[in-house]
Amino acid sequence: MPSIHVNGIDLFYDVQGTGEPLLLIAGFDCDSSYWSAVMPALINKYQVIRVDNRGVGQSSAPDYPYSIQQMADDAAALLNYLGITIHVAGHSMGGQIAQELALAHPEKVKTLTLLSSWGKGNAKFYSLIELFGDLPKKLDVKFYQKILLPWMFTSEFYSSTGAIEQIINFIEEYPYLPTPHGLYHQSRAILKSDTSKNLINICCPTLVVVGKEDILTPVELSQQLAGGIPNAELVILERGGHGFLVESPDAVVEVMLNFLAKHSYPY
């Protein structure tokens, strides 16, 4: 996995596939591996670039405050380095980073796909994010990751034989779990972020997708997000919660590819 030095950090990224470039930005606590289940379908159509945000994965995790705009600047620096304009998809916090990227660098962003994201959260959401940032200082990192799972996945997923066990096994073996201070600074970046008043300035084609059973960023937040962006499309998936990239990857990638096909050059 290559890296570049930007904005005082080493930023790791991965490139697979051919076609028009598509940047994938993961959310809080997640690195580029979070997109693994949708990658096979995406790389058949696009040159897919995944990035580890500052604070997670193989990117640097400096112990000082982060901001969503700063993480968007990291992504913009990568696009400058690669010399490309690009389709951008972001999940959860990655959706907010994608929004800020499109606002600050509209010439670089062809389309936006915002998955399980928001412009402005509600009181419960912010309370949870504050807690999610504080807990890593008090819990073993692997146990902390397990604590998050009920917020990510539906009862149906929990009932699927071996599904949660597979996730736990991945956590137990994964060599790049984030540091407590990296998670703290990511959480505080979320708490300070509010794109709601600037959404009207997003001018590229935009798709907003949310799972009907998302209890962390519920449907109403995606409805508000789509309502604030001119001509944005909203898709509510019947199956899946906040972690639908893992739980319902086929449904998510179908919606993504249908949207992207309308705004891509034929190859």
Image (cartoon, rainbow, N blue to C red):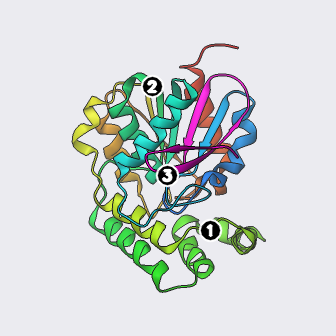
The answer, for residue 113, to whether it is visible in the render is no
User: Residue at (56%, 59%) from the top-left corner?
Assistant: 30
Q: Residues within 10 Å of mark 2 (few under 14, many from 20)?
A: some
Q: Secondary structure at mark 2?
A: helix
What residue lies at 67% left-to-right and 43% top-to-bottom? Answer: 2
- Name the residue beneath numbered marker 2: 108
The secondary structure making up most of the magenta span is strand
* Image coordinates for residue 62, horizontal then vertical, percent: 46, 62
Residue type highlighted by circle 1: Leu
Q: Residue at x 35, y 59 (%)?
A: 189
- For the magenta stretch, what is the residue range? 1-25
Quadrant including the C terminus = top right
Amino acid identity at mark 3: Ile
Residue wearing tag 3: 9
Question: Under tag 1, what secondary structure?
Answer: loop
Q: CA distance from mark 2 to mark 1?
A: 31 Å
Residue under pointer 1: 177
SS assignment at label 3: strand
Compare marks 3 and 2 and give the one earlier in the sequence: 3
Horizontal and vertical percent position of residue 77: 47, 36
Compared across the picture, whether 214 is left or right of 202 comes to right
Q: Is residue 17 magenta?
A: yes
Q: Amino acid at mark 2?
A: Lys
**Label 2 or label 1, whichever comes before in sequence order:** 2
Asked which quadrant contains residue 134, the reply is bottom left
Rendered view: 246 above or below 95: below
Q: How many other residues sit within 10 Å of disc 1, few (<14), some (14-19) or many (≥20)?
A: some
